[in-house]
Every structure is written in structure tokens, then in C-alpha cells.
Image (cartoon, rainbow, N blue to C red):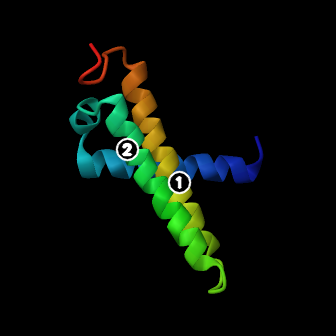
Amino acid sequence: MTENERLALDAVVKEHEYQKERWGTSHDQEHTPEEWLNILAVYLGKLGSETVAFQGLGYDPEKFKKRLTQIAAIALSASAVTSAGAPPKGTG
């Protein structure tokens, strides 16, 4: 693993912990797979909108990296809930 990859993973873990503190862990377990996809789609849409806005106005790599980190942390939460063995709400 490269140093940049390690730094990126550390940032994802830090963001994941922030999200758990902000929203709580039981909140994650209440999402259906469709809700997880919707949350990810919203954040991917934000990333896309911001990327388009950057064109011609100057690219901000820190904002881009922060949004990618948020998306990865959301995906981590969804994966952790799925890995816990209990099916998300609406699937069992």
C-alpha cells in the first residue's frame, strides 16, 4: 500500500467515525439497500455538480477529495451493516 493510499484510508475511517457520531449506529441499520443507494447517489450527484462547477472556475482538489472521502465512508457504513449479518430493513 502506498503512503497516499494509507492517508486516503485513514481519512475514510476518520469520516466514518464522524458520521457514526453524528448519526448514530442504529440509524445505519434502519436503511434499506435502496436507501443506501439513494444516499450514495445524492453524494455522487454533489460530486458531479461540484466537478462541473470547478470547470473554468479553478479546480479545488481538497473539496473533491473531501467529497470522495464522504462517499467512501457512506459505502463503508452500508457494507458494515450488510456484513453484520442482519438484513437491512425491508429485505428480510
| Residue that appears at 64% across and 71% down | 61
Horizontally, is 48 left or right of 79 in the view? right
| Amino acid residing under circle 2 | Asn
Horizontally, is 42 left or right of 89 in the view? right
Residue 65 x %, y %: 59, 62
Figure quadrant of residue 63: bottom right
Q: Residue furthest right?
A: 2
Badge count: 2
Secondary structure of the residue carrying numbered label 2: helix
| Amino acid residing under circle 1 | Thr
Residue 17 x %, y %: 38, 46
C-alpha distance separating marks 2 and 1:
17 Å
Q: Upstream in the sequence, badge 2 or badge 1?
A: 2
**22 versus 34 height, above or below:** below
**52 versus 70 height, above or below:** below
**38 versus 67 height, above or below:** above
Q: Could you say which is closer to the camera, residue 42 or residue 69?
A: 42
Label 1: which residue? Answer: 69
| Residue that appears at 66% across and 85% down | 56
Q: Could you say which is closer to the camera, residue 20 or residue 31?
A: 31
Q: Which mark is residue 44?
A: none
Residue 84 x %, y %: 37, 19
**Comparing marks 2 and 1, which lies closer to the viewer?**
2
Other residues around mark 1 within 10 Å, as few (<14) / some (14–19) / many (≥20):
many
Which quarter of the image is occupied by the C terminus?
top left
Q: Residue furthest bottom?
A: 57
Q: Could you say which is closer to the camera, residue 19 or residue 33?
A: 33
| Residue that appears at 53% across and 54% down | 69
Secondary structure of the residue carrying numbered label 1: helix
Q: Which mark is residue 38?
A: 2
